[in-house]
Structures are given as structure tokens and as C-alpha cells.
Image (spheres, rainbow, N blue to C red):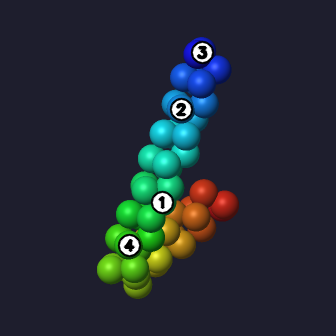
Amino acid sequence: MRADYKRRIKTVMVYAMAVFVRNEHVLIGRSHSVRLSQYRKLKFHKVT
């Protein structure tokens, strides 16, 4: 019972992450150039 419960939580978390990632992809796809440039700037600043 307990193991099944833990497995179910894991599955739900994985599913939630997949949905979140897909939504991020959709958002990036919509405002591709703006998001990408901002992301590159952030990454560049983090590196330097």
C-alpha cells in the first residue's frame, strides 16, 4: 500500500513536470525571438 502510494506521487510529479515543460515550449514558441534573446543575455551574464 505504502509503496504504491509513493509510486503514484512520483508518477504525478513526473506528469506535472512534463506538462510544465510542454507549456514552456509553447510559450517560447510564441514569443521565440524575444524570449531567446533575453535567455541568452541572462546566460551570458551568469557566465561572466
Quadrant for residue 30, please give it: bottom left
Q: Amino acid at mark 1?
A: Val
Q: Residues within 10 Å of mark 3 (few under 14, many from 20)?
A: few
Give the x, y percent position of residue 37.
Answer: 46, 78
Q: Does 32 sit left or right of 43 as displayed?
A: left
Name the amino acid type tagged 2. Answer: Arg
Q: Which residue is mark 1?
A: 21
Q: Are the residues flagged by discs 4 and 1 in contact, CB closer than 8 Å?
A: no
Mark 1 vs mark 2: give the one in front: 2
Crowd class of label 4 (few under 14; some 14 to 19; many from 20; radius 10 Å) = few
Q: Which residue is mark 2?
A: 8
**Residue ID at (66%, 61%):** 48
Out of 37 and 11, give the one closest to the viewer: 11
Please, is residue 32 above or below residue 23 in the view? below
Establish if 12 lies above or below 18.
Answer: above
Placement of 46 over or under 38, stated as above or below = above
Q: For marks 4 and 2, give the one nearer the viewer.
A: 2
Q: Secondary structure at mark 3?
A: helix
**If the image is split into quadrants, where does the N terminus sit?**
top right
Q: Specify the amino acid type for callout 4.
A: Val
Which residue is depicted at the point 48% across and 39% down?
Answer: 12
Q: Position of residue 45 (x, y in %)?
A: 57, 62
Mark 4 = which residue? Answer: 26
Q: Residue 4 at x, y = what percent?
A: 59, 24
User: In whole angstroms, how far apart are the C-alphas of marks 1 and 3?
Assistant: 29 Å
Residue that numbered label 3 is attached to: 2
Q: In the image shown, does 4 or 43 lie closer to the viewer? A: 4
Query: Disc 3 residue type?
Result: Arg
Q: Earlier in the sequence, mark 2 or mark 3?
A: 3
> Depth check: 33 or 6 in front?
6
